[in-house]
Amino acid sequence: MLDPSLREQSYDVGIVYSEDMAKEQNELSEQECLEKLRDRIKAAVDFPVIVIVGSRVENIEDIPDSCKATLLAYSIRNFDIGEDEEGKPEDKAVNKQIIDALLRAVKVNDKESIVSESRKLLNEMTSGQANARLIRMGINYLMFELLHMATEQDDNVNQREVFQVINENALSHIDADDGEENLTEILVEYGDYLAQLRANQSKGVLSRIEQDMKENYKENLTLKDLSRKYYVNAAYLGQSFKKQYGESFKDYLNRIRIEAAVELLMYSDKKIYEIAEEVGYKDLDYFINKFIALKGCTPAKFRKQIK
């Protein structure tokens, strides 16, 4: 990509790269082939050249997605211009406290703080007090922690999906020439992505817990034990459960057990206390009270009516 801001008569140039190009160059690797291309372009022009490689795509109709990945790299390049220099005593690394504050804002999806903290970070990067190597370290740390946030929410999420969210959502409607707006928009969109990921993961956990309850209602199930099993805060799980199902965890568990007891009352000759124990109740009186609350009569009367 040739930077048009340096010369009025210059234009961005895009090249569709194919694996065959490297093979035709005496079996060069992809990196070697691209470096050779860069060197040839540099030798042919009298002004600085920036070459940025987009993400790999399988079909030609997906090339716009690769271009979006290039825009992300183009934005970050504003804070990483030039070759690495030897560190000087007065050089300062990017303030980790600023990056950590920005990451916390993204994690809780605090958009106002994301905007303010990203501005602080960009000011630090463009202050001229950190060289290219130190700036890259800060960017790498930021990106690593963003990926880690996603995997914290869902172990099954992969990094390719995370980068796809950044490329397709954050870069679809912003001006790549404005580094500050670009990076801020990316982080705001990523905060929304993490919030959605949390919501989806929460629903997934509740679904697994519900299935666990239906399969193991005979056991001594407690909200605390299930929260440990599924790595969810017990208070949060209780609130989410009531919001999702309209009743508390205990009420929902009692409903499952009583419905199982109804089946046994209808299709078996087991005694009432045997049924109570089989569906998970150790206290017969408690079982009868719960049965009356849900079915309007005692288990014995219910069986008699059915008979």
Image (cartoon, helix red, strand yellow):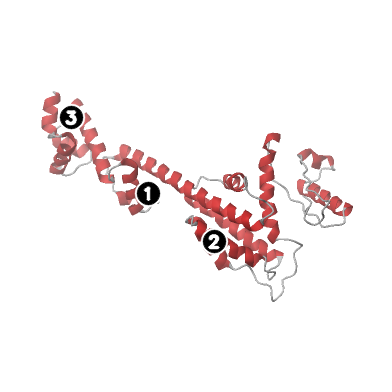
Place of residue 70 in the rendered image (x, y in percent of width and height, measured from the top left): 69, 48
Q: Is residue 254 above or below residue 194?
A: above
Q: Report the residue at 52% width, 64% height from top.
A: 101
Q: Residue 194 bears which disc, if any?
A: none
Residue type, numbered disc 1 = Lys
Q: Provide the residue designation for mark 1.
A: 229
Q: Provide the residue designation for mark 2.
A: 102
**In this rendering, does residue 216 appear at all?**
yes
Quick check: marks 2 and 1 in contact, CB under 8 Å?
no
In the image: residue 109, left or right of residue 86: left
Q: Residue furthest front?
A: 8
Q: Report the residue at 64% width, 69% height from top.
A: 93
Q: Residue 265 bears which disc, if any?
A: 3
In the image: residue 240, left or right of residue 304: right
Residue type, numbered disc 3 = Leu
Place of residue 162 in the rendered image (x, y in percent of width and height, measured from the top left): 57, 47
Q: Kindly report which numbered mark, 2 or 1, lies closer to the viewer in this rendering.
A: 2
Q: Is residue 33 above or below residue 114?
A: above
Q: Residues within 10 Å of mark 2 (few under 14, many from 20)?
A: many
Place of residue 64 in the rendered image (x, y in percent of width and height, measured from the top left): 68, 40
Q: Residues within 10 Å of mark 1 (few under 14, many from 20)?
A: few
N-term mark: 2 or 1: 2
